[in-house]
Amino acid sequence: MQKVIIPHQNILIKLHELQLELCKKINSTLKAGEFCQPCVPLFISVNDIDLDGVFEGIFLGELNSDGETFFIDVEITFKNKKQEQKLLLAAIKRKDGESKTKISLNQDDFSSLTTGLQKSIKVFRLCEMEFLEEGNSKKWTVKSEKWIKIR
């Protein structure tokens, strides 16, 4: 089981649009046999966070990359503490396995993608999810959820 935060649908729609544009830009630079794969579902893992506090804010930061995966930095604040997390957007893959290509993220090229993206998440689902593999099918399943609204 994994504890995750899933933003409200309005933010998910914007994040999905960002994913598509990001992959479109990345795919135009990749070698044959490589492709940009959007991460689905979009969530923020909070397994390593003590969730006993009251959420004060969830803030989306800059679009970043380690060369193979692309993510948005996220800051989660509770009373008297902050946690840094990542919201994974996409990864470079090869048809025959993991990619060897690394893409350097030039903020000027990608900053327009985050224009219009709400920087604060006020409504979200706090979920326990499980990754299931059934034959050739792999998917995340929500086992429990609780809607949270930050005031």
Image (cartoon, rainbow, N blue to C red):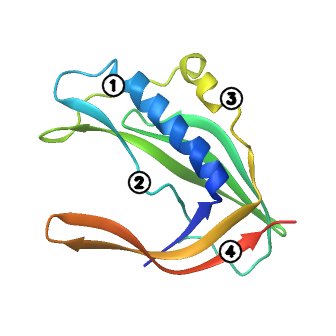
Q: Left or right: 135 with respect to 1?
A: left
Which is nearer the N-term, disc 4 or disc 1?
1
* Marks 4 & 3, CB-CB < 8 Å contact: no
Q: Which residue is mark 2?
A: 40
Determine which of the numbered discs, if any, sits on residue 115 in the image.
3
In the rendered image, residue 89, in percent from the top left (x then y), is placed at 47, 44
Determine which of the numbered discs, if any, sits on residue 10 in the image.
none
Q: Which one is in front, 130 or 85?
A: 130
Amino acid on which disc 3 is placed = Thr
For the residues labelled 4 and 2, the Cα–Cα distance comes to: 20 Å
Label tally: 4
Which is nearer the N-term, disc 3 or disc 1?
1
Q: Which corner quadrant holds the C terminus?
A: bottom right
In the rendered image, residue 121, in percent from the top left (x then y), is placed at 73, 55
Q: Secondary structure at mark 4?
A: strand
For the residues labelled 2 and 3, the Cα–Cα distance comes to: 22 Å
Is residue 32 shown above or below 79?
above
Which is nearer the N-term, disc 2 or disc 3?
2
Q: Secondary structure at mark 3?
A: loop
- The residue lying at 17 percent from left, 22 percent from top is 32
Determine which of the numbered discs, if any, sits on residue 147 in the image.
4
For the residues labelled 3 and 1, the Cα–Cα distance comes to: 21 Å
Q: Which residue is mark 1?
A: 27
For the residues labelled 1 and 2, the Cα–Cα distance comes to: 18 Å
Mark nearest the camera among 4 and 1 is 4
Amino acid on which disc 2 is placed = Val
